Image (cartoon, grey):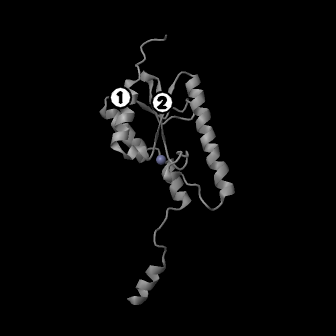
Amino acid sequence: MTRRMRTKRQTPKRPVMTRSQVMSRVRDRDTKPEMRVRKALHAAGLRYRLQRKDLPGRPDIVLPSRKTVIFVHGCFWHRHPGCVRCRTPKTRQDFWIPKLEANVERDQKAAAALIEAGWKVRTIWECETERPSTIECFVAEVMATKKMTRKN
Ligand SMILES: [Zn+2]
């Protein structure tokens, strides 16, 4: 018994997710943060479409009636400024830094292309989706966006 306990103790205290586990989580289409946003939009009576592949950056949620796209960004992958989850890994920085910088650059380019095409671009961060009041504000802002009637 004591022996068994000792071997158990030797395992790492906190099983940290491996990078591939993190990645597979991120690749899940219906990630939790996105689901939270969708739920709140739906509850507010807003109708949306998901991942329009024809739009730059493949926005997570598209509200055609308000010409609005929503990105639900993971804090780590998309580098939420000032967020604790946005820490850069200490190991393999030559791999991570360019990769993460490329993500940010891709996001910026996609947003610019969308705005150029007349879309309103809104981003909500993963950590923000965990605060109900923040989601509420976010949804209220989206609702305040004018509905598209006809072309100006
Ligand atoms: Zn964050």
**Residue 19 location, quadrant:** bottom right
How packed mark 2 is, by other alpha carbons closer than 10 Å (few <14, some 14-19, many 20 or more), is many
Q: Secondary structure at mark 2?
A: strand
Residue at 61 percent of width and 48 percent of height: 100
Residue furthest right as drawn: 94
Q: Residue at x 57, y 22 (%)?
A: 117
Tell me what residue is drawn at x 48 percent, y 52 percent: 25
Q: Which quarter shows the N terminus?
A: bottom left
Q: Secondary structure at mark 1?
A: loop
x, y percent for residue 102: 64, 44
- Disc 1 versus disc 2: distance between alpha carbons? 13 Å
Name the image quarter holding residue 91.
bottom right
Q: Residues within 10 Å of mark 1 (few under 14, many from 20)?
A: some
What residue sits right under mark 1 in the picture? Answer: 46
Residue drawn at the location 50% of the way across and 53% of the way down: 85
Q: Nearer the viewer, residue 83 or 57?
A: 83
Disc on the earlier residue, 1 or 2: 1
Q: Amino acid at mark 1?
A: Leu
Task: In the rendered view, tell whether residue 105 sits above or below residue 4.
Answer: above
Asked if residue 76 lies left or right of residue 35, the reply is: right
Which residue lies under the disc numbered 2?
Answer: 69
Above or below, comparing residue 83 to residue 106 in the picture: below
Viewer-proximal residue, 46 or 27? 46
Question: Does the beta carbon of the residue at mark 1 sit less than 8 Å from ligand 1?
Answer: no
User: Residue 21 vs residue 1: left or right?
Assistant: right
- Count of marks, rendered view: 2
